[in-house]
Amino acid sequence: MAFKKHVPNIITLLNLASGLIALVFAFDTNYQLAFLWVAIGIFFDFWDGFFARILKVKSDIGLQLDSLADMVTSGVVPGLVMFQLLNGIAENQQEYNLEANNFYLGILPYFGFIITLASCYRLAKFNVDTRQTDSFIGLPTPANALFVMSLAVIQNFSDGTGWIFEALSSPYVLIGISLLSAFMLNAEIPLFSLKIKYFNWETNKVQFIFLIVSILLLFALQYLAIPIIILFYVVLSAINNKFWAKA
């Protein structure tokens, strides 16, 4: 009985450990492995609350621990990755060298941490917002982290040509993505929770639809599917709010 109450917290700590490992790879600009460990951390984050409910051991410390782990895995890591992407542009591309007429590019990489700051505020707001017990208001930090991390992976897998590579190699586009990310994290937009409370179709219909479509997209497009899946999440939430949530 004593061990049972620690099971969800152990799962949460595995989320935190995954985020710390992802940080190591992000510092080394190994975005593929950083993405993998963030995804593993989010997997643990998906299940800690589920086991807390099933085992009936929900606690205040579990809630706080969950947010602290998410802050690292889904807040610090994507902010660092965006910093690295912007910093790599300033260092490696001749047109963005730090000369007198474009010295501001030496400051721009730090704007990537807007994602981290917005994630911190998002998590703090979630902990005290009673409206977000069964759903989200604003993009959840794990979904946002996957979106940002996937862009780094897509850029890495690009062959150095094409409009996608060019877009993700522009500091202006990346700053725009950082600002959009910060906005979506804290926007007053209702989004369904990704966590499945019970294995029941009626109460989790939208979650199951999202899961099935996401798996199909991943099989079809692989890593290119991640940004599309996040967009689909927002669109499906709008459909859910309009039709199913009111049913």
Image: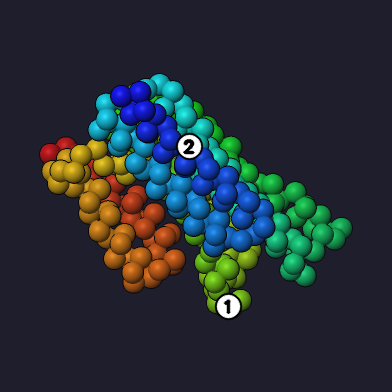
For mark 1, give the secondary structure. Answer: loop
In percent of width and height, residue 164 lies at 53, 70
Q: Is 126 drawn above or below residue 111 in the view shown?
A: above
Residue to which mark 1 is pinned: 159
Q: How many marks?
A: 2
Comes first in the chain, label 2 or label 1: 2
Q: Give amino acid for label 2.
A: Leu
Residue at image position (55%, 40%) is: 72
Which image quarter: residue 56? top left
Tag shown at residue 13: 2
Residue sitting nearer the eye, 7 or 77: 7
Residue sitting nearer the eye, 137 or 214: 214
Quadrant of the snapshot with the N terminus: top left
Which image quarter: residue 102? bottom right
Which image quarter: residue 61? top left
Quadrant of the snapshot with the C terminus: top left
Residue sitting nearer the eye, 200 or 104: 200
Asked if one can make out residue 102 in the rendered structure from this viewpoint, the answer is yes
Residue at image position (29%, 46%) is: 237
Residue at image position (63%, 51%) is: 24
Tag shown at residue 192: none
Q: Give amino acid for label 1.
A: Asp
